[in-house]
């Protein structure tokens, strides 16, 4: 089972869809497309009865391409991966990194789907799904997409803590175009599970991911920023850009939700700890759940430890003062 996180500024844990549910969704989509094709064909033939046979044949081919090929592509693009069949079965098409698909993804899936679904009656698609570890057909492989299940138990949802407030907007000018989808997926899955890892192992993984991310962006991580906080801040910037693209013309009026807004009330920002200030006397990172040494302290960092009260060693006389 592969667990993913979507890129629409919402953290979710999704699972790849199984072959039976995908086949049922495809059958429902084909049934709707064929019905629409038959209805439109009857209407066009009745309206163009005066045309010659060659013109009617050209219209039939155009309607086939428009309804059975262009229709599913348009529906998946406008619905961000949810056709009627997938909506009924609780499925959705996403990118390899869990983000929403775009027109190019739907176009590649639709064009290859004509060959592996329509022309071969789904035989090629079934074989490819059985061979693939995540149940992907050829259209998904070439488009870089994956069909996942949206209906998952609430207890399985993951949460990526937002970065600390002092990193808000720090990476707004960073170029993220060269970062591959696989690295985004690795970063998201690490941030979701880092509190379950051993502190030493978690810190090493964060440093490695931060190094890979800095190499892809061409900008090194700022000095004094913990690796996990750096990863979370860059991930938030990427999700904010995805949200602005998705909702720029929608009902939000350009004010898309961000990860920090969603998790501000959950206390996630403080989980990354204060910035690391390098000194000559201390080389140990500050106390945080992602530090190199030790466990997370159960007491707040700002709590002042009071000295113990003095103990009176004088012998008791057995009398208590009057109230």
Image (cartoon, rainbow, N blue to C red):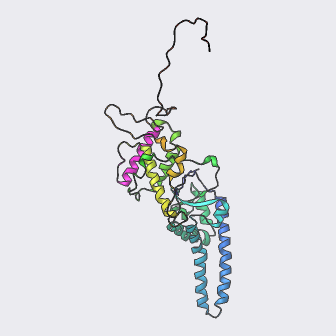
Return the residue nearer the eye: 174 or 40: 174
Magenta stretch: residue 314 in it? no
Q: Quadrant of residue 316?
A: top right
Q: Quadrant of residue 120?
A: bottom right
Return the residue nearer the eye: 160 or 18: 160
Q: Which residues are magenta?
A: 201-222
Return the residue nearer the eye: 183 or 164: 164
Question: Quadrant location of the C terminus?
Answer: top right
Looking at the picture, how far across and down is residue 161, in whole percent? Answer: 51, 46
Residue 263 visible in the current orientation: yes
Looking at the picture, how far across and down is residue 73, in whole percent? Answer: 56, 70
Looking at the picture, how far across and down is residue 187, in whole percent? Answer: 47, 49
Looking at the picture, how far across and down is residue 297, in whole percent? Answer: 49, 32
| 50 over 279 or under it: above or below | below
Residue drawn at the location 63% of the way across and 90% of the way down: 48
Q: In the shown orientation, is residue 270 left or right of residue 221?
A: right
Residue 142 visible in the current orientation: no
């Amino acid at each position: 089972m592969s667990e993913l996180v979507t890129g629409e500024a919402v953290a979710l844990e999704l699972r790849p869809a199984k072959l039976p549910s995908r086949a049922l969704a495809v059958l429902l989509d084909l049934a709707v497309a064929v019905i629409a094709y038959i209805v439109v064909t009857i209407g066009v033939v009745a309206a163009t009865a005066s045309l010659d046979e060659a013109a009617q044949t050209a219209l039939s081919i155009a309607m086939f391409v428009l309804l059975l090929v262009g229709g599913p592509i348009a529906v998946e693009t406008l619905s961000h991966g949810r056709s009627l069949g997938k909506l009924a079965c609780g499925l959705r098409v996403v990118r390899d990194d869990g983000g929403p698909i775009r027109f190019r993804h739907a176009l590649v899936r639709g064009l290859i789907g004509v060959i592996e679904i329509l022309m071969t009656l789904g035989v090629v698609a079934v074989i490819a799904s059985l061979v693939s570890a995540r149940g992907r057909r050829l259209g998904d492989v070439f488009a870089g997409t994956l069909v996942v299940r949206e209906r998952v138990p609430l207890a399985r949802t993951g949460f990526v803590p937002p970065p600390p407030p002092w990193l808000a907007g720090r990476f707004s000018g960073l170029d993220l175009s060269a970062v591959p989808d696989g690295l985004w997926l690795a970063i998201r899955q690490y941030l979701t599970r880092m509190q379950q890892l051993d502190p030493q192992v978690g810190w090493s993984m964060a440093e490695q991911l931060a190094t890979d991310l800095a190499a892809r962006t061409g900008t090194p991580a700022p000095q004094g920023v913990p690796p996990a906080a750096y990863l979370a801040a860059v991930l938030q910037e990427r999700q904010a850009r995805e949200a602005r693209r998705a909702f720029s013309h929608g009902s939000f009026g350009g004010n898309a939700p961000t990860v920090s807004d969603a998790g501000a009330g959950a206390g996630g920002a403080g989980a990354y700890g204060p910035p690391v200030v390098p000194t000559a006397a201390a080389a140990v990172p500050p106390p945080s759940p992602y530090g190199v040494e030790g466990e997370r302290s159960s007491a707040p960092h700002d709590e002042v430890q009071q000295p113990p009260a003095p103990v009176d060693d004088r012998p008791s006389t057995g009398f208590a003062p009057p109230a």
